[in-house]
Image: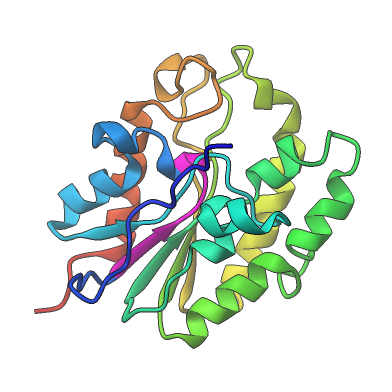
Amino acid sequence: MVLTGCGEDVTREKHARILLMGDSLMAVHHGQGQAVSHSVEKQLGEQVIDRSVVGARMIYALPISGAAGLNIPKQYRPGKWDWVILNGGGNDLWLGCGCFACRGKMERLISEDGRKGVIPGLVSKLRHDGAKVLYVGYLRSPGLGSPIEYCKDEGNEFESRVKQLAGLDAGVHFLSLADLVPHGDRTYHAVDMIHPSVKASTEIGKRIAAVIGKPPN
């Protein structure tokens, strides 16, 4: 079995202040140099270490492929990070629970008050290591036959919980993408109507860069 590699390595020679972790929302278009991280780099004029992997989940039991990046918490590498850009949970819910066990899986990911679960545990670790955290939400369907259309309620509930988590700590920020895709506009999605198009990845990067801002002199 061929394993998907885990983005960029973190080495002593790299002194970036921004780490990015997550699933295909972040990772798609990376091979073409047009992923979200590339857009952030262009906006801020600095390097972003991108560890995201297509298909990654927050809850992932297999050890070898998990270590290769399909387990989002295992994408993390310690460093002097000012910011960690983070997303995830969509593959756990919409592809990982078979549409019959979303409630239980969501509770494992994050409780209703945002205090318990895999995601709060990961965010707590990142904050303990000194980084501010920017958790990025997901694109919404344009209402044109996207497979994720039927998961709208679950997606809204999930992001409501992440917003609760962000409200507990001034160093944690939630960036919603709920208003990014105009109704009826296919240009923000790839042909599968799930993943972001290059246009969307660029716009997501711009929004992330606006939150992080330029490094202090």
**Residue plotted at (33% across, 49% down):** 207
Q: Position of residue 53 (x, y in %)?
A: 48, 46
Q: Is residue 109 magenta?
A: no
- Location of the C terminus (image quadrant): bottom left
Instruction: Between residue 81 and residue 153, name the one nearer to us.
Output: 81
Whether residue 139 can be seen here: yes
Q: Is residue 86 above or below residue 91?
A: below
- Asked whether, in this view, residue 95 is left or right of residue 14, the answer is right
Quick one: which residue is furthest to the front in this view?
1
**What stretch of residues is rendered in magenta?**
18-25
Q: Is residue 169 visible?
A: no
Residue at figure coordinates x 84%, y 44% from the top left:
102
Quadrant in the picture for residue 115? bottom right
Instruction: Look at the picture and state if 46 lies above or below 180.
Output: below
**Quadrant of the image for the N terminus?**
top right
Occupied quadrant, residue 83: bottom left
How far across and down, in percent of the image, does residue 205 sit?
31, 46
Colour approach in the figure: rainbow
Left or right, 115 with reference to 130: right
Position of 169 relative to 87 (above/below): below
Q: Which percent across, then down, holds residue 40?
A: 26, 51
Q: Residue at x 62, y 18 (%)?
A: 146
Count up the numbered dots. 0
Instruction: Provide residue 107's location: percent of width, then percent of height.
Output: 82, 60
Q: Residue at x 35, y 36 (%)?
A: 201
Q: Nearer the viewer, residue 196 or 23?
A: 23
